[in-house]
Structure formats: C-alpha cells, structure tokens
Image (cartoon, rainbow, N blue to C red):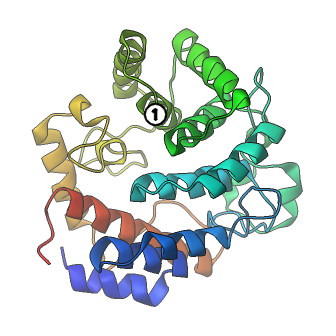
Amino acid sequence: MNFEKAANFIWKHGRLLERRIFEYVFQGGSKSNILISLKAYQNDDGGFGNAIEPDLRSPSSQPLYMEFALRILYDCNIKDEELAQKACYYISKHADLVKGIPTIFPSSAKYPRAEHWNNSHSAEPSFSRLTGLVGLLKWQGVEDSWLDKAIECCLKDISSNSYEDAHTILTAFCLLESLPQTDYIKGLFQKLSKELITANFFRLDAYSQSYGLSPLEFSPSSTSYCRSIFSDDTIHDHLKTLESQQDDDGGWQIEWEPPGETARLEWRAYKTLKCLMIFNSYNKINL
C-alpha cells in the first residue's frame, strides 16, 4: 500500500470534510475543524443535506444524510452536544416509532441521484434506518425522553425480527454498542452475530468479487465492538485483499455507479480515507 499516493488522491479529489479528517488522523489536526466542515452540511431544521452522501445531490435534509454525518463522528470518535441535540430534534420530528423512518424523502427525486435510489422502498419508513440513527444518537450521549422510547422500540425490533441484510445488522450493532452491556444486550449481540454470517450483502470471503460489506466494515479497528466475531486470519486476509485493491492513481475504486463524475471522485476520496484509517488502526502504516 502506497500511503503517499493515497494521501495525494485525497488532497486532489477529496472534499474539505475528507481533508479535515485526514489532517486530524494523520497530521495532528483538530476535532473542531472537522466539526466546522461537517456543520456546513447541517440545515436550519437540524438535519443534514447538500449531498454529504455523494450519491444523492439534494440540498434538503434527508435521513440518509443524517446517518452519514453521525457515522463520520462515530468513526472519528467525536462527540458534539450541539450538533447531536439538533440531530435528535430532526429525527424525532420525522420518525414513526411504529413504522420507522424513510431513507430519503420523495422530494429528493427532482435532484440527480444514483440509480439505486430510484426505488420506491427508499421512501418507505424503515426500522433498520431508524435503529442506526437512534444508536448513533445514543452514542453521542444525547439525553432525551423521545430517544429513550425510540431505543425501547428498536431493541424490540432487533429481538423479535430476523435481520437478513448486512447493512441493517451494521446499524443495529451501533445501537447495541451505545448501551450498557447487560445480559440482554449481550444476547442480542450474539443473535446479530449469527445472522450476519448468512446475511445478504455480507462478504466473508476476502477474495470474493461481489458487492458486500466485509468484516472490516464491522471491525475497522482492533478494538471495535464487533472484533470478537471474526478470527485473526479473517481480518488478516481482508486487510491483505484491501491493500491489493489500491488503484494506480493512489485511490480505491467504488463498486457502484454514482450519479456523475464529481460524485465518483468524492466517493473514491471518502473510501480511500476510510481505507487509510483502517490500515492505521491495525498498525499497517509506518509514518
């Protein structure tokens, strides 16, 4: 893996957000600079918009964008009370504790977007989307009566339903991680761990060419909540494969068709940054 070429790719194609995160992780940059760049995407309603998730180019707030933004804070181990309280207010106004929350709203259809968002299910309420958002809010340390009720509803959903999609399981783990590790939570962790192995879009085989979430998505560091699910050999094989996938231009490719070349480069810079962060957490980079 060529660190310098990867860094150059981020400087060349990354948004200010990715560049600030790179500075923070690798060059002693500040958390405040990440927050400043992240809050530029936050709208007056408390939600996030403005294509922070590059596959949807809408300026208006979307639950999809909210998860993307909160996940960045999670990945960088940053907690911000002001941002999180506004986010909680936004989610509480759009979530239904019986049905969940949509991924995107129908109003986003008038803006450019990737083909995979052109489906009716994206605009339907989803409990898996709500579970991830609730978990990320709880991880932020938000104290709110609505959030307490939402946590109960999401835990009930995890307990009573079989999770068959790796993306759903990834967000559900985030909720479990944010809570005290009681026997009940540990039991749900074991349930999801078993369901993950046979879930759709989970790529356990390091050499598979198909799209899917790899163990490194669930365990991006040696201290990750889900690290115990995977053997050392599995993590080693996926790290080795990920390293081999670096492109000649220094970046990593994406496995789907974005809405345009700008989105493609933004995604590639984001993915390249995430790859470097994973390698760094597993001590695979010598700086």
Question: Does residue 248 appear in the picture of this structure?
Answer: no
Left/right of residue 137 with respect to residue 164 in the rendered view? right
The location of residue 61, given as percent across then percent down, is 78, 58
The location of residue 19, given as percent across then percent down, is 45, 80
Where is residue 251, by image quadrant? bottom left
Eyeballing the image, is 143 above or below 280?
Answer: above
Question: In what quadrant of the picture does the C terminus appear?
Answer: bottom left
Left/right of residue 207 with respect to residue 55 in the rendered view? left
Q: Secondary structure at mark 1?
A: loop
- The residue that mark 1 highlights is 178
Eyeballing the image, is 162 above or below 96?
Answer: above
Question: Does residue 169 appear in the picture of this structure?
Answer: yes
Where is residue 65, by image quadrant? bottom right
Identify the residue shown where x is 49% and y is 40%: 139
What kind of residue is marked 1? Answer: Ser
Q: Crowding near pointer 1: few (<14 within 10 Å), some, many (20+)?
A: some
Identify the residue shown where x is 41% and y is 32%: 177
Eyeballing the image, is 181 above or below 48?
Answer: above
Instruction: Report the front residue among 149 and 69.
Output: 149
Question: In what quadrant of the picture does the N terminus appear?
Answer: bottom left
Left/right of residue 266 with respect to residue 220 in the rendered view? right
